[in-house]
Image (tube, rainbow, N blue to C red):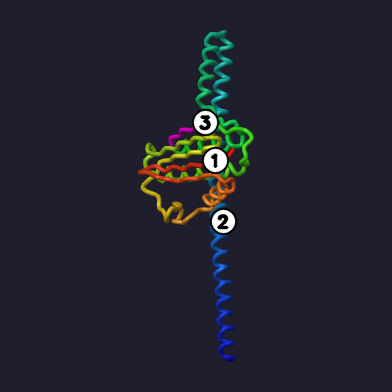
Amino acid sequence: MYIWILLALATAAVLGLSAIFASRLFQAKVEKEIARYQTDYVQKHSEEVENMYRETRGWRHDLKTHIQTMKAHLALGEYQRLEEYLNELDCDLESVDNIVKTGNLAIDALLNSKLSLARAKGIQVEAKATVPGGLAVSEVDLGIIIGNMMDNAMEACLRIGEEKNRFLRVYVDVLKDQLYIYVMNSMDGKPKRAGRVYLTGKGGREHGFGLVRMDRVVEKYHGFLDRQNEEGVFVTEVLLPL
């Protein structure tokens, strides 16, 4: 009788220690994934800031040249040529203006920084976006969704060897009283899947923290999210209630 009690206690102790060990292993794995996600996020943000700094320096250099040219025309009394130069400059500024103007300053900053970096990395970009006011979705949550969609699309494009085959399409607008977010990107080969879940390209992990955060935000607002692929193309679609 006592032997069975001792065996039961010993078994319970072993199981308890196993559960504690498994819990600690899981916690360590989660902490490692979080650290990796934070490192990736900082690196992406640093690349965007560096790219914006390079563009700003280029604009300052061009502006100085334009001012000198206009002052020269003015000094020589070449008013007709000065007017033509100003008109040409105005058209040129339109072409280098922000890629998108959604109507939401926070989303404009996010989208334009991502798209500008994509172009700098040799990705062909097409974008059209409109974000109405008075959204039920917070700007922070919307930033999580759009930011992760853009980051994943860019990473897939950069795995393609030839730059001419890299492209990224973005469309944001209202569709049937819902905010519709669409991102299409080129990709190399076929994405790995486990059932209906797409695997990330980062070491074969099932779901990166970025994707998990994105999925949870969509669920939070009872929205709709769909990921699908065809040969050489990946598409992510999100619908959020207004």
Asked if one can make out residue 94 in the rendered structure from this viewpoint, the answer is yes
Tag 3 and tag 2, C-beta contact below 8 Å = no
Whether residue 112 is situated above or below residue 83 in the rendered picture: below
The residue beneath circle 1 is: 48
User: Which segment did they paint magenta?
Assistant: 123-128
Quarter where residue 241 is shown: top right
- Residue 125 horizontal side relative to residue 133, left or right: left
The residue beneath circle 3 is: 99
Asked if one can make out residue 122 in the rendered structure from this viewpoint, the answer is no
SS at circle 3: loop
Whether residue 67 is situated above or below residue 234 in the rendered picture: above
Magenta: main secondary structure equals strand
Does residue 124 belong to the magenta stretch?
A: yes
Does residue 102 belong to the magenta stretch?
A: no
The residue carrying pointer 3 sits among few (fewer than 14), some (14 to 19) or many (20 or more) residues within 10 Å by Cα, namely some
Q: Nearer the viewer, residue 191 or 122?
A: 191
